[in-house]
Image (tube, rainbow, N blue to C red):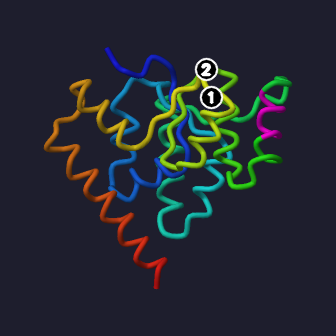
Amino acid sequence: MSPFSKPVIIDNDCISNFQVAGVLEDILCLWPPGTFKIPGRVVGEAQRWMQHGAKVCEILKKLSGSGQIEVVDIDDDSDEEVSTYMALVMNAPCLGQGESESIAIAKNRGYIFASDDRLAKEKCNGLCPNVKTIGTIDILFMARSDGLAETREVNPIWEKIQRNKSRNTKDNLR
């Protein structure tokens, strides 16, 4: 039984972490179709990613076309979803549009919110205490605990993500 009791809406930072580790498609295909939802604004953010954006969008388009993932947008007919999104955009300028869309959809559709952004998780927990928040490491742990990946597969992925984060931090300090 998967620990994902609800669909998981994934923010751009988790997507980019998995892509940098070279496992985005593999991770999104471990669980049954429909487990993962990708907000349209997150896809838009990925398109602007110079280094890996084209490849990420190619993967997301392929997986969406096959029904493995679903690209979702704010439901314009849902006053609650629209107002949640607008409140986040107006009152949480530290969040990107993709994060705001992810949180609004998670809150109003009962999804799990996956992000590695501490501020996004804090805003989500403050606004929507009933929304479960997870990150990249949690997804990897769930893959291992579900028997979908072994420790010897998961550890190198996490190590590669951490090396990339460390390198980016050092680059930003120069």
Q: Is residue 158 magenta?
A: no
**Majority secondary structure of the magenta segment?**
helix
Q: Which mark is residue 110?
A: 2
Front in this rendered view, residue 108 or 119 = 119
Q: Is residue 87 above or below residue 22?
A: above
Q: Residue shown at 51%/24% (left/top)?
A: 7
Instruction: Write down the region rendered in magenta.
Output: 81-87
Q: Quadrant of residue 151?
A: top left
State the mark number for residue 155: none
Tell me if 120 is positioned left or right of 136 in this view.
right
Q: Residues within 10 Å of mark 1 (few under 14, many from 20)?
A: many
| Relative vertical location of residue 167 with respect to residue 159 in this rendering, above or below | below
Residue 141 vs residue 46, the one in the foreground = 141
- Kind of residue at disc 2: Gly
Please tell me which residue is depicted at 47% across the width and 58% down the height of the picture.
Answer: 55
Could you say which disc has been placed on residue 106 in the image? 1
Q: Position of residue 106 (x, y in %)?
A: 62, 28
Disc 1 marks a residue whose amino acid type is Ala
Q: Residue at x 33, y 57 (%)?
A: 161
Q: Secondary structure at mark 2?
A: loop
CA gap between label 2 and label 1 equals: 5 Å
- For the point 71% across and 35% down, which residue is it? 73
**Could you tell me if the residues under marks 2 and 1 are in contact, i.e. CB atoms within 8 Å?**
yes
Q: Position of residue 104 (x, y in %)?
A: 70, 33
